[in-house]
Image (tube, coloured by chain):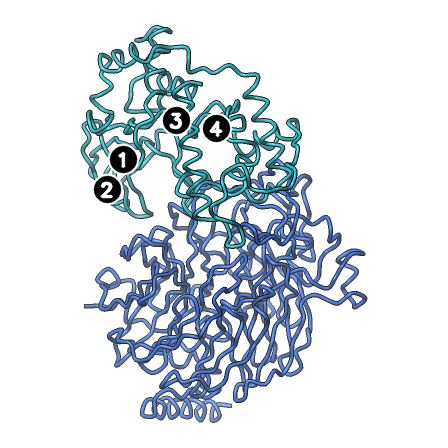
Amino acid sequence: MKASKYVLTFLIAFLTIHARSFAQNVPYVRLLHADGEPQNWLMYGGNFQSQRFSRLKQINRENVHTLRPVWIYQPPKPGMDEASPVVVDGIMYITETPSTVTALDARYGTRIWSWSPVLPEHVYTIGLHPTNRGVAILDSTVYVGTIDAHLVALDAKTGAVKWSVLVADNKRNYAIASAPRVINGKVIIGIGGGEAGVKGFLDAYDAKTGARLWRLWTIPNPGEPGSETWGPDMTGTGGATTWVTGSYDPDLNLLYWGTGNPAPDWNGKGRPGDNLYSCSLLAIDPDVGKMKWYFQYTPHDTHDWDSSQVPVLFDDNVNGKPRKLVAMANRNGFYYVLDRVTGEFLAGMPYVKQTWAKGLDAKGHPIMLENTEPSAAGQLIYPSVMGGTDWSSPSYSPETKLFYVTAHEMGAYFKEGQPKLDFSGPPNFGGGGQSALSGDDAYGAIRALDSLTGKLKWEYRLVAPAWVSTFSTAGGLVFSGSDEGNFFALDASTGKLLWQFRIDGANVRTNPITYAVDGKQYVIGIAGNDFVGFALP
Amino acid sequence: MSAIRSCLIVALVFALGSLARNTLPASQDPQRRPGTQSAAPPIVGDPDKGRDLFQANCSGCHGIDAGGGDGPDIQQAPASLGDATVANIIRRGVPDTPMVGFFSIGDAGAADIVAYIRKLGSTMSSETTKGDPRKGEEIYNSSGCPACHMIAGQGGEIGPELTSIGAKRGPSNLHQRLIDPGVNLPKEGNVGDRGKWTLYLLYRAVTNDGHVTEGIRMGEDSFSIVLKDVNGNFHALYKPNLRSLEKEPLKSLMPSFKDTLSSAEMDDLVAYLVSLKGATP
């Protein structure tokens, strides 16, 4: 055991050195042991567990107040960037709106190459922002999903296209904004388009050839098991998309992926029942693309509370027994802890104000309150359509055992309307909408939750609900941003503000990360479409 | 038809014109005139259903009687512009104004709202005829208003600019603000996700060394706030350096005119303010 660990460490060290001299080679073994090379940020979520925790500590509680910008990269095209950079051996891969991939020198922000797809004149992006949340890398290939629903493999050194496959038909409102998840030899990609009522799925492609290996539909066809949860008029469509990158446990060989809302969003009358497998967490065997278990957070959702939040994997003792866990701060306002082997519900509680459920029962199902459905005149419910949190990633620190999440304290008047696909105005299959309480009637916070229970440990209040991810570090820090354009660092144990910097007037709405090059730690913050590298003097 | 109403109609027609240019899909003729959207027979709305929808969606800005609030008086809009045009504005909004589109209300819902506004317009007498705007202008000048408010480039810069206040607020709303200036402060238009922020909100800030600043919020983020005090001076404050920062929701830097103006003088002043339709950019 000890010897094999030594060999493994040696192997990683060798591969890392090897990779530095023959840049941009990331074999799967490096991804498996991403935590062993904290100078890199090798994938969406930082590691397969999506913990967004960095072992770097050059920047720490004592010196973070001296952090200052060292470079700014602004893509030539304006847009609201939501990317999570990937950093490999001094090279940073970012995406720019809507589907451009750019490689930068991570020390100076110098552009090395850029690739953009040739997009059709009209791209359908119903209910989603025409943006991209990042790339994946394996061996010497960078993978990206495009807004017109293609999956493209690019050469990591040049940006040359190795292969490109059509994932789904954008004219039928399928689109991709999420980063792919790469596991051994496979590229897993999710899809968006739930507000147009598409049939959701998750796909796996051969990393070398682009051949599709499997497709897992998230909605059963009429007559299949689960179809009874949609009522007699079910057509086999109705959302349940897979638009945020999931996590992976290599030991259990299980993928964990959240699914989106059922459609039409706010009018559930035509779909009586739980609407499987919408608003759920799916545990998937990636060898065959079959579901091993599922857990539905919000049965029969009528508030657009996708469960497209990042499932975070960690291990801890529960009642004195070591357990493998998966936690999610859900858009519906509750924090959930499940056993990730079986899907068993272990704990859950609200982490923001919510007015739709009395609580969760012993199995984690919500105990519904009366009069919480959208109505013609508008029904005030917390949280709003934007949820307790949304797609932005939380982080988990194995040192503090806290779960850091961006929280929205915001209600909305939910309105029911008639669902129809109508392209004569703003397209809407939603069957309603919301008037959110905003401005001074809402606020945001970075909250630190006890990862085993969801109990609030501390919060740092923000003027407005923010849509930005967090990351935590071994330097005792949590970084995040505000909707007003500030980027800041808090003490991971107490929530005390240690440093802040106003990047620009646009929202910070992305996934900040940290990395190191030549022994110097950097932090990247992004507001609007400004990518700003920060370092100590 | 009063001059005021003509101005309103011109403004709405102009707004609709820009709406047609900016937002109608290519499949529709952009040159088509307002009120001739479709050859199909217009949907006949139900004013009783429209009342609920109006109160839930429209009254917050346009007043419970459609006589104006933070948004303009729209009681006569269906009679002047035609039902189809108003329904179109309801569903699509007016670009570059706080009037957002209520697309999810649907064609039938919009028709119901129009029917309700038409009913209000036919039964309500307009409030704007009560006072004398010329007398109101004298009262405005003699009551000290120009010290804080600007009209057409003349006046102070502490309170809101009033050059086109009559196009933005209804008479009952203005009357209420003269009596209780700190109540129901207006909110700015819905700018994307960033929400409707309360304007002219008064704050009291105390720094760690005990210095007190009171003023209206001009700008704020999670770490700093800029207040404008009663003398018009800006104070930029860093929140981590503050001992306390409290909203004073019912207070205002503006005095109440409840006891200083007679009821007739108040009507005259309101009539003057309503007449300010000034050039909007």
Q: Amino acid at mark 2?
A: Leu
Q: Rounded to the nearest whole Å, what is the CA distance between mark 3 and mark 1?
A: 43 Å
Numbered disc in front, either 3 or 1? 3
Query: Does residue A449 appear left or right of residue A54 in this picture?
Result: right
Residue on which disc 2 sits: B237
Q: Identify the chain drawn in blue.
A: A
Structural crowding at the residue carrying mark 3, measured as other residues with C-alpha within 10 Å and reported as few (<14), some (14–19) or many (≥20): some
| Mark 2 vs mark 3: in front | 3
Q: Which chain is cyan in the picture?
A: B
Determine the CA span between mark 4 and mark 1: 34 Å
CA distance for labels 2 and 3: 42 Å
Query: Where is mark 3, residue-wise?
Result: B7
**Disc 4 vs disc 3: which is toward the camera?**
3
* Pointer 1 residue: B205
User: At numbered mark 4, what does the secondary structure look like: helix, strand or loop?
Assistant: helix
User: Marks 4 and 2, Cα distance to the nearest angstrom?
Assistant: 35 Å
Check disc 2 and report its element: helix, strand or loop: strand
Q: Earlier in the sequence, mark 2 or mark 3?
A: 3
Q: Secondary structure at mark 1?
A: strand
Q: Are marks 3 and 1 in contact (CB under 8 Å)?
A: no
Q: Are circles 1 and 2 on residues that touch, CB within 8 Å?
A: yes
The mark nearer the N terminus, 1 or 2, is 1
Residue A500 seen anywhere in this rendered image of the structure? no
- The disc label shown at residue A308, or none: none
Task: Decide which of tag 3 and tag 1 comes sooner along the chain.
Answer: 3
Q: Earlier in the sequence, mark 4 or mark 2?
A: 4
Q: Position of residue A143 (x, y in %)?
A: 47, 79
Q: Amino acid at mark 4?
A: His
Q: Residue at x 60, y 33 (%)?
A: B53
Q: Earlier in the sequence, mark 4 or mark 3?
A: 3
Q: Is residue A2 left or right of residue A105?
A: right
